[in-house]
Image (cartoon, rainbow, N blue to C red):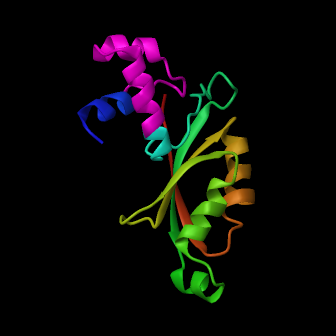
Amino acid sequence: MDEFDEELITNIDSGIVKYTSLAKKLNSPVSSVHFRIKKLEKEKIIKYYKGEIDWKKAGFSLSAFVLINVDINLLKSLNRTQDTLLKELLSVIYVREGFITTSDADIIIRVIAKDTTHFKEILLDYIHSKAGIVNTKTMVVLG
């Protein structure tokens, strides 16, 4: 991957590849842009395209980060890992992204909800119900 490829992948907007716009922006022929994007897709550097959702307009006005502490020994006794727990959490439609971290929290997830009541339901029904989670701390995004 060279500088041209880096420019391409950083300029792909909201899951829609606009070859003409990219070619103009990069001062390159459309055919070159198209060829290189197909090459990046084949090499799995570009894995997939996704649309960007305005969650507030869709009725999900609350966004929060949930810091999760895990009981590693309990997970091991259940033949599970932090990776499997994170995958379970990411399968919840309201969990938009998540990461295993080296901070005070073992896992951090970003959750969307309609309001605080809905967030409470998500926290209790979908997050705290997962075996291995010891406690959580929530940071609500303002604005």
Q: Is residue 26 left or right of residue 125?
A: left
Residue 3 in the image: x percent, y percent? 24, 34
Q: Using the image as rendered, state which of residue 50 and residue 35 is in the foreground.
A: 35
- Residue that sits furthest to the left in the current view: 3
Residue 21 in the image: x percent, y percent? 42, 12
- Residue that sits furthest to the bottom in the current view: 77
Q: Which residue is rendered at x = 36% and y = 28% of the image? A: 8
Residue 57 in the image: x percent, y percent? 65, 21
Q: Which residue is rendered at x = 49% and y = 62% of the image? A: 107
Is residue 53 on the magenta stretch?
no
The relative height of residue 68 versus residue 115 in the rendered view (above or below) is: below
The relative height of residue 23 versus residue 7 in the rendered view (above or below) is: above
The relative height of residue 2 versus residue 77 in the rendered view (above or below) is: above
Q: Using the image as rendered, state which of residue 90 and residue 40 is in the foreground.
A: 40
Dominant secondary structure (helix, strand or loop) of the stretch shown in magenta: helix
Q: Is residue 10 left or right of residue 15?
A: left
Is residue 36 on the magenta stretch?
yes
The relative height of residue 108 versus residue 51 in the rendered view (above or below) is: below
Q: Is residue 102 left or right of residue 49?
A: left
Q: How many marks?
A: 0
* Quadrant of residue 88 within the rendered picture: bottom right
Q: Which residue is rendered at x = 62% and y = 26% of the image? A: 56
* Quadrant of residue 118 within the rendered picture: top right
Residue 29 in the image: x percent, y percent? 35, 14
Q: Which residues are magenta?
A: 11-39
Q: Which residue is rendered at x = 61% and y = 61% of the image? A: 87
Q: Using the image as rendered, state which of residue 28 and residue 68 is in the foreground.
A: 28
The N terminus sits in image quarter: top left
